[in-house]
Structures are given as C-alpha cells and as structure tokens.
Amino acid sequence: MAKDLLLEIGLEEVPARFVRGAIDQLKEKTEKWLEGSRLEYGAVRAFATPRRLAVLVEGLAEKQADVSEEVKGPARKIALDDSGAWTKAALGFARSQGVEPEKLFFKELGGVEYVFANKSSAGLETEGLLPEALPQLIASLTFPKNMRWGAHELRFVRPIRWLVALYGTEVVPFEIAGVRSGNVTRGHRFLGADAVIEEPKQYLEKLREQHVIADIDERQRLIENGIRELAEAKGWRIAVKEDLLEEVLFLVEKPQVLSGSFDPSFLNIPQEVLITSMREHQRYFPVLGADGKLKPHFVTVRNGDDVSLETVAKGNEKVLRARLSDAKFFYEEDQKVQIPEFLAKLENIVYHEELGTVADKVRRVRAISDRLAQQLRADEQVRADVSRTADICKFDLVTQMVYEFPELQGIMGEDYALKAGERAEVARAINEHYSPRNAGDTPPASPVGAIVGIADKIDTIVGCFSIGIVPTGSQDPYALRRQAAGIVSTLLAHGLELTLPELFRIALDVHEARGLKRDTLDILKDLNEFFALRVKNVLAEQHIRYDVVDAVLEAGCDDVRRTVLRAQALQAAVGDGDRKEAFRPAVEAFNRVCNLAAKADESRQVDARLFAEPAEGKLYEAWQKAHGQYEKAVLGGELAAALEALALLAEPVGDFFESVMVMAQDEAVRRNRLSLLATIADDIRSFADFSKLAG
C-alpha cells in the first residue's frame, strides 16, 4: 500500500530571486533520493512562497523494493589458486558482497570465466528511512547566500521557523536547527493563522483557507489574470517584464493586483528613467499608451486581500513620488555638469588594480576602436564618430543617475550627449556599445556602435586574460562569456570582414603598451579556445547538427561569418533524403584523399611530367578548375557554391583511386602523387574535416 509524503520547510522571508532555484533543487533532490532508495512513487509536486518550500510525493511505497542481482567478481584464474581453493581476491569479493564463499559461482563472459555472487537484500520500511533522510535532504540544499542564526551550526538561506513532515497521517519525527517536525503549518503572516494538516493531500486547501496560494502556477495565473483584467477595464497596455513577474511571484503569498498614479509632470524625465525607477526600486509594472509612450499610472501586486485598496494605492503613490522626485533631482543636477568634467572623474575610479582606472580603459578602447575602423576601411565620418564615441562612451558612469540606477548606463549617456550637442550618431553609439546586454538582446544597429562595442568588449576580455582571469567551469565574475558572445553576434549581424586573429592582435598590441603579465602565445591560445566555444554555441543555436559543427570547427573559426556559412552549407548538403545520398560519394572521396595526404611531406610541388596514368592528369586538371572556383566562392562568401566546387572532385578522385597505385615503388612518382593529394586535401580541410560526419 502507498501513502503520500509531505515535507514543508517554513522560513523567514526568502529573497525572491532565490526561491525558484531552491524549490527546483528540493524537487530534484527528493526525486533523486527516492530513486536511489528504491522507493516506488507517483508524482512529485513542488510548492513555494516567500515563507515556505514544500514537496508532496504522491503514492510513496511503504517499503523499499527487494534487491536480487548478480555481481561480477574477479576472473576464474584470479579467484582460484593451483589447488582449486579460493584465493584472497575471491574471499575478499565474497566478504564485500556479504555472501558465504561456498555460494560463489562462475559464469562465462566474452570467452572468460568470472566469479559471481547473488546479492540479495530485503527492502526496508519507508517510515524507518524518512526520519534520517528528510533532515539530510533539507541540509543538502544550497543557496547563493547563506546565514546562521542562534547557536545552530546549520547554514541556510533564512532561519527555519517550522517544519511539516507527514507520511500518510503520521508525523515523520526529526529535528533540525532546534525545530521539531510536526503537522502544523502557518498561514499568511497578517491574514492567516496556524493550521493543522491531517494528511498531505489537504495541504493546498488548508493553506488556501489561511490566505496562502502555495501552488506557484496558480499564483502566477492570478497575477496575470489580474493584470489583464485591469488593462481591459482601463484600456491600458501594461508592460509585463518576465523577470519582474518572476520576482513579484515570489514576493507574495496571496496576490492582489491594483493600480495607482503619479504626477504627469514627471513625464518630462526620460521614459527609461521612470520605468527603471518603478521596476527596480518599487517592483511596479509601467503603463503604456497605444503609442508606446509611458502614462502616469502604474500597476503593482499586493500581498494580501482586496480590503482598503484605495488606501494601499495611495501609500504606493506616496513612495513612488519620493522615488521619482529623487530621479528628477539627479537628472537635473547631472545636466549642470559638462562632459569633460565627468571624464576627469574617471581618472580616479579604479577599473581593476592591474588594469588601471576607467579612464585608462577608455584610452585603450579609443586606440582599439581607431585600429578597427581603419582595418574595416570605414569612411572618414564613421572614423570620426568612432573616435568621439570611444572618448566619451563611459562618461555617464559617474553621473548621479547611473550611480543610483546602474541599469541606465549608456541610456543616460545617449540622453546627456544629445543635450550636450553631440552628433546623434555618437550619442546613439554610446548607448549601443553596451549591446547585446543579455542573451535576448540584439547587437548594436549602427556601424559606430558596433565598432566601439567590439572594442570595449575585446579590451575587457584581453585585459582579463592577460592577467590570468580566464573563466573556468561556471565561474565568470566578469561576464566574459557574454561579452565574447556579444562580439560574435555583432560580427555576424554586420557581416564585418574582420577575423578573430586580427581582432586579438589589435587588442594585444594596445595592451602590450602597459606590459603583459602572461606570455602572448599563451593568451592567444586561451582566446582561440574561448571564442571557438562561443562560435560553437552560435552554431548550436542555429540547430546545426553536432557532427557538422565538429567537422566545420576542425577547419577553424577565424572568420566567424564564413564559419557559420560553411556550417549552413554543409548542413544542407548532408541533410536527409536524396541530397544526402547524392553528397555521400563526395564525402567518401574527401576522406580517402585526406587519409592518404597525411603521408605526404610538406612539399606541395606537383610535377605534371611525372604523371604516369591518365587519371592523374585528369584529377590535376579537375582540381585546378575546382580550386579557382572554390577560392572565388569563399572570397565572395558563397560557401554553398564553394562546397559544390569541391564536390566536383568526387568523380575524378574515384577514377584516380581506381587506376592509380599511390604508393608506387618509384620514390619521385610516389612523392608527386602524395603532393597532388595533399594539395587537394588543403582545400578540403579548409572547409571541414569530413571524417567527423556521422553516417
């Protein structure tokens, strides 16, 4: 017979950003323990609010499954001595499996006899396992930040205040951090009371009676429905940002949507400032008109019921008015300061103790930007705009507005630059050079923003790599992976004729002026590997097959744009159906050429006078024609055409191998034939390593 299991961990309010990860972890660890304990169970449901993490296991078996398995031990020749007695190895194996030596037996596997033992054990009662397992499960949870309280040794996200642990109708007895498990949960902090849970399936309803919606999905539906109904009633467009919705979801136990207003005079402040103030500081959703312009209203979610909503709204309005007044003050004060004054302050702000001040970084970004604009053959006006943008791209970091709202860096730079009389292209690029700011963001739209953005990001990456800060595992405190991905996406978006080695060299040249802590070759090696992974991610996001990705990257990814085009062309060629079959002879020919070409020396001198078979001359002529077409197609970015040019070699390659003995006895003939294959292989390998293709 099976029973339900309920575990609820009652806590002081947990930071909203920690709750989702915590409840996912609790659910996953519970399932892992159940499976590892050989306990059959039905669904595992997880619930969470700011004050509780809970799992409900439906249909948990009352007893572990019995175990009966054959365990393999040492080979017969090791298990028996010359007299046929058990050796120490066999006796140790029997002891480790808990069986008597006389119960050991032999079975043949792969032509070799091994000793085996039948290992059997009866399953334990679930109620006997839970008192030890549940506190261990709780203690195993990890959080971005932990705390200790009282004299307890346990480090946890917040102090544990109550525990509910029920298996069927019985309490699972245990104690952790001075709190004993029971069957009493706590309702809403202000509206609810304690409630006795008689059996796990009552959990959600008992909490609902105490004004707590513990089901995460239900709570989210209530918030979304409330926002939608309010928008329809008022004729508003409410801007719901997913990360803010997620945060609000874990700030409340009983959601109640309401709205408020603010003085329309605040709309003279840039819209981004008002929205950021509402979202970041107050957790309010902004209200927009049909034209996308901000309206003097906001929407928020109360942790409570619908009593006295007007009073609650007025309280929220009062708090917001103070926030917006601060923003207005900062905005007006910033405009009293000239850009050169802000730039001077950057001299006193340390960017990194080994990389200098923010002003030092700006000077490096200017130097890299100028070199990039020159490399890309930008016109005179773009070069001038790039230089000016690079010079002032960080000035807004020392404004009062960005100090208060770091999310507005670049946004305020654009606004202040326009008011200071800078060219619109420069002001826009100040904002754009930070893009893409996150995974869902787009690269800079303008060429000026793209060039300065690449310069800023590669300066950060090369600077960090040069002093030994290279991301490992999940650790990436300087967001170097995101910045490298931003460079890759910008190169692709603008189709820039700039290779990664060229970019690395420009940045390293600038950094070498201050002196490098690491060897240049080591830095370059790390940069190449680091960016190859970013390109690999881009290809994976485009749903390129894993084997195609591996084949293409083996040929290098120095030219990001052409690497992506190579992958797309090869993916199309090796797709399903007739096209795949039509391309198969080419792949086989490429692999045969490359395999034998590995035996050639470094010489690529092919002497037509040494051709002894007609097929040699025909292959050489076919390659000369294909090579010209291939190079022209690659240069023009027509990688599908380049692959088609290589595929034309399939038939002459097949004829060559049919009638020519490559490893001829005559050394000169043999070397000449290998040189021919090596010459062809150079073109093939520059496109992909076709041996990595699957099937």
Image (cartoon, helix red, strand yellow):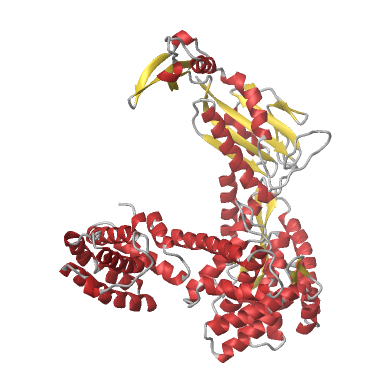
- Residue 368's quadrant in the figure? bottom right
Residue at image position (68%, 76%) is: 364
Residue at image position (65%, 53%) is: 247
Q: Residue 593: image x %, image y %?
A: 29, 61
**Would residue 290 be seen by someone viewing this image from the given angle?**
no
Say left or right for 173 vs 380.
right
Q: Is residue 357 above or below residue 478?
A: below
Q: Residue 229: image x %, image y %?
A: 57, 58
Disc tally is 0
- Residue 430's quadrant in the figure? bottom right
Say left or right for 19 vs 351.
left
Q: Residue furthest bottom?
A: 380
Say left or right for 460 vs 695.
right
Q: Is residue 647 above or below residue 1?
A: below
Q: Residue 310: image x %, image y %?
A: 73, 58
Say left or right for 89 vs 244.
left
Residue at image position (16%, 61%) is: 659
| Foreground pick, 1 / 495 | 495
- Residue 454's quadrant in the figure? bottom right
**Would residue 404 be seen by someone viewing this image from the given angle?**
yes
Q: Is residue 94 above or below residue 671?
A: above
| Foreground pick, 490 / 263 | 490
Q: Residue 583: image x %, image y %?
A: 25, 61
